[in-house]
Amino acid sequence: MIKLEEYDSVMALTGAGVSAESGVPTFRGGGASAVWKGMSFDVISSAQMVTENLKEVWEWFDYRRGVLATCVPNPAHAALAEIESRVSDFLLVTQNVDGLHNRAGSKNVVEIHGNINRARCEGCGRKFELEFDVVPHNPVNCEGCGSDLRPDIVLFGEMLPDGAYEKAIDWAERCDLFFVIGTSALVYPAAAIPQIAKRHGAYLIEINPEETPLTQIADESHRGAAGKILPSLVRPER
Ligand code: OAD
Ligand code: ZN
């Protein structure tokens, strides 16, 4: 049991595992989305593929949007939204592009890897919301300048969105409670955020069915599904 009320500033970092119970496949550990047309996800989700074969990139992301269209937030997403409503200062940093945190009611969310329901113009940078249950995507070209649209997602070999990492680090340095949930903690710079929080004195709680590189430095590491463990950890005492 965590007494949330004893903490001034609370932060969380989530990864694909927080959405696993919603039916969203994870990347590592062999989910259905780990390979696409014989290419591993880190090949198809790369900056190079956008240059060489944008059509395939869209096909892969449209496939994932199709999977997501049937998914709904699970109790872990709901618990994070509830934590936000119970503490004065809260920031959720997610590596997920599925938008499920927002759909569950989380407000202060930084999507450091972008959002799958948004496209961005390769020419002028303008962003377009895609209807999340309409697959394939539409429009195909920028209404403004006519250039190709690409998914507004951070691919391997690309920078994080402007200011996103800086904001996360600023919070990590001053939060006093940090949840790291459902991430293999292998992809940087995201994986550095909980380490920085810990180094600056935050109490670090990990939730993951498997050990990760963060397990060693966590103050508590809970083995199991986020949708079961997180609600029980933060449920108010009666
Ligand atoms: P991974 O697929 O690497 O890791 C998912 C983690 O979730 C693993 O450690 C699992 O053990 C854990 N997990 C599985 N089911 C869970 C459950 N029910 N509750 C809690 N945890 C569970 O996903 P990420 O760490 O998010 O990048 O991967 C990081 C980035 O790599 C992603 O954001 C993606 C990918 O390339 C982009 O899309 C840009
Ligand atoms: Zn444009």
Image (cartoon, rainbow, N blue to C red):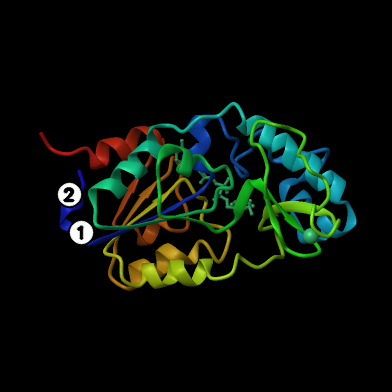
Residue hosting label 1: 7
110 sits to left or right of 3: right
Image position, residue 215 (x, y; %):
40, 55
- The quadrant of the picture occupied by the C terminus is top left
Nearest to the observer: residue 214 or residue 41: 41
Image quarter of residue 228: top left
Give neighbour class at mark 1: few <14, some 14-19, many 20+ (Cα, 10 Å). Answer: some
Residue farthest toward the right in the current orientation of the protein: 52
Question: How far separated are the C-alphas under marks 2 and 1?
Answer: 8 Å
Nearest to the observer: residue 91 or residue 210: 91
169 sits to left or right of 31: left
Disc sitting over residue 219 in the figure: none
Residue hosting label 2: 3
Image position, residue 129 (x, y; %):
65, 46
Mark 2: which amino acid?
Lys
Image quarter of residue 234: top left
Label 1 CB less than 8 angstroms from ligand 1 = no
User: Is residue 235 in sight in this rendering?
Assistant: yes
